[in-house]
């Protein structure tokens, strides 16, 4: 067993922070000074290393490139007003990571490697947590198969890594969304609930098609009938109809159980809304829109946090919203941000101290 003190640490000579201004940075472009790397071989995890961020050397036959045993997570670290670093709901991401690992026939990562490694890494790179509003340190844990052979079978070797990227807002303006009825993100029995790299690769074409039509993202519908709402781009999605917030349920296994989704459910209930996790058809959405009861539509995700949807196009029917009139989504965002930036009491125990 590896203890927390058993991380091999190699220090940087000079911080890249000297050359980067952390204000107004785009999502996912810059990476911090350190990264965590640990290999799985001969049925066990080797000693984890924390070392200067650097490229990997790979054999062209690397299994992950060919057959896609590759999973990841998205987590965020924030600073409170006293400048202390905290990670938002990291244990939930750790649990979901291993659910993805099991679905993809990959080894689970022990808590002491994932969580102790993550905390240590954040401590070493805490200067990289931006303090500007809407900014945070995006944490990307990931694992991929590393067998050097092109036979199709679960790999025997894997690499688990964590990299960190200081970041600003993901979607900065309200979005125009195209309801997708041809392409499919996930089907029952598939890997939709896992954060598998292939889910994102498989979404690229439909998303690019929607962009070519002038939209920002797609709203995925169910694989069998294309009638029911699933996810929106890389986000979970919420509809507020009357005083009820509705979001698709997780029981079919086609939707990612978002940590932000779960947090928003908790906060919506605290704000007094009725919350329903259930199937929601586009016909019901359209009827509510026509009746004037469809109040707000928004996406939730780690990268995106809360993203307002100002237009939904379903077949030839266009639903437009005046997002400046909305109350609920902005309040949820305000409450969530206040907890994350340490400006409101964390009554749920969401902020993990580093
Ligand atoms: C996240 O919200 O963290 C995601 O993983 C979405 C995207 C950046 C891939």
Image: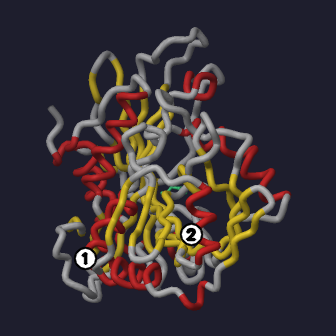
Q: Is residue 304 above or below residue 9?
A: below
The label number, if any, that marks residue 98 in the structure image: none
Q: Say whether mark 2 is within 8 Å of ligand 1.
A: no
| Residue shown at the point (56%, 37%) measured from the top left | 186
Q: In this view, does 174 lie above or below 149?
A: below
- Disc 1/disc 2 C-alpha distance (Å): 24 Å
Q: Find residue 27 and report its image quarter.
A: bottom right
The label number, if any, that marks residue 288 in the structure image: 2
| Residue shown at the point (41%, 16%) measured from the top left | 156
Number of numbered markers: 2
Whether residue 320 sits left or right of residue 80 in the image: it is: right
The label number, if any, that marks residue 270 in the structure image: 1
Q: Pointer 1: residues within 10 angstroms few (<14), some, or many (20+)?
A: few
Disc 1, SS = helix
Circles 1 and 2: CB distance less than 8 Å? no
| Residue shown at the point (58%, 36%) measured from the top left | 198
| Residue shown at the point (56%, 53%) measured from the top left | 281
Q: Choose between 109 and 268: the one closer to the eye.
A: 268
Q: Position of residue 130 (x, y in %)?
A: 44, 78
Whether residue 204 sits left or right of residue 133 in the image: it is: right
Q: Position of residue 322 (x, y in %)?
A: 64, 85
Q: In this view, does 329 lie above or below 39?
A: below
Dividing the image into 4 quarters, which one contains the C terminus?
A: bottom left
Q: Pointer 2: residues within 10 angstroms few (<14), some, or many (20+)?
A: some
Colour scheme employed for the rendering of this structure = secondary structure
Dividing the image into 4 quarters, which one contains the N terminus?
A: top left
Q: Earlier in the sequence, mark 1 or mark 2?
A: 1
Q: Where is residue 338 in the image (x, y as percent from the top left)?
A: 32, 84
Farthest top residue?
151
Q: Position of residue 147 (x, y in %)?
A: 50, 19
Q: In this view, does 240 lie above or below 211?
A: below
Disc 2, SS = helix
């Amino acid at each position: 067993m590896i203890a927390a003190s058993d991380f091999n640490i190699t220090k940087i000579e000079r911080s890249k922070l000297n050359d980067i201004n952390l204000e107004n940075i785009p999502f996912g472009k810059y990476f911090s000074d350190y990264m965590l790397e640990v290999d799985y071989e001969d049925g066990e995890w080797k000693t984890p290393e924390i070392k200067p961020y650097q490229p990997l050397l790979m054999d062209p036959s690397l299994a992950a490139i060919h057959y896609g045993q590759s999973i990841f997570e998205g987590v965020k670290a924030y600073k409170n007003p006293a400048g202390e670093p905290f990670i938002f709901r990291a244990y939930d991401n750790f649990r979901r990571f291993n659910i993805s690992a099991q679905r993809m026939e990959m080894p689970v990562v022990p808590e002491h490697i994932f969580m102790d490694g993550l905390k240590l890494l954040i401590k070493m790179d805490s200067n990289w947590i931006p303090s500007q509003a809407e900014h945070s340190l995006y944490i990307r844990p990931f694992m991929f198969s590393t067998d050097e052979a092109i036979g199709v079978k679960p790999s025997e070797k894997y690499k688990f890594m964590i990299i960190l990227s200081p970041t600003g807002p993901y979607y900065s303006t309200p979005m125009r969304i195209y309801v997708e009825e041809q392409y499919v993100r996930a089907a029952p029995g598939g890997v939709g609930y896992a954060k598998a790299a292939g889910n994102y690769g498989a979404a690229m074409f439909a998303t690019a098609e929607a962009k070519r039509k002038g939209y920002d993202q797609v709203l995925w519908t169910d694989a069998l009938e294309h009638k029911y709402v699933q996810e929106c781009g890389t986000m979970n999605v919420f509809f507020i109809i009357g005083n009820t917030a509705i979001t698709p349920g997780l029981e079919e296994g086609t939707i990612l159980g978002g940590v932000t989704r779960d947090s928003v459910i908790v906060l919506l209930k605290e704000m007094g809304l009725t919350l329903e996790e259930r199937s929601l058809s586009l016909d019901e959405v359209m009827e509510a829109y026509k009746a004037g009861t469809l109040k707000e539509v928004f996406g939730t995700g780690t990268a995106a946090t809360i993203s307002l949807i100002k237009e939904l196009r379903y077949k030839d029917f266009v639903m437009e919203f005046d997002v400046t009139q909305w109350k609920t989504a902005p309040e949820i965002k305000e409450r969530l941000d206040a907890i994350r930036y340490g400006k409101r009491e964390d009554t749920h125990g969401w902020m993990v101290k580093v």
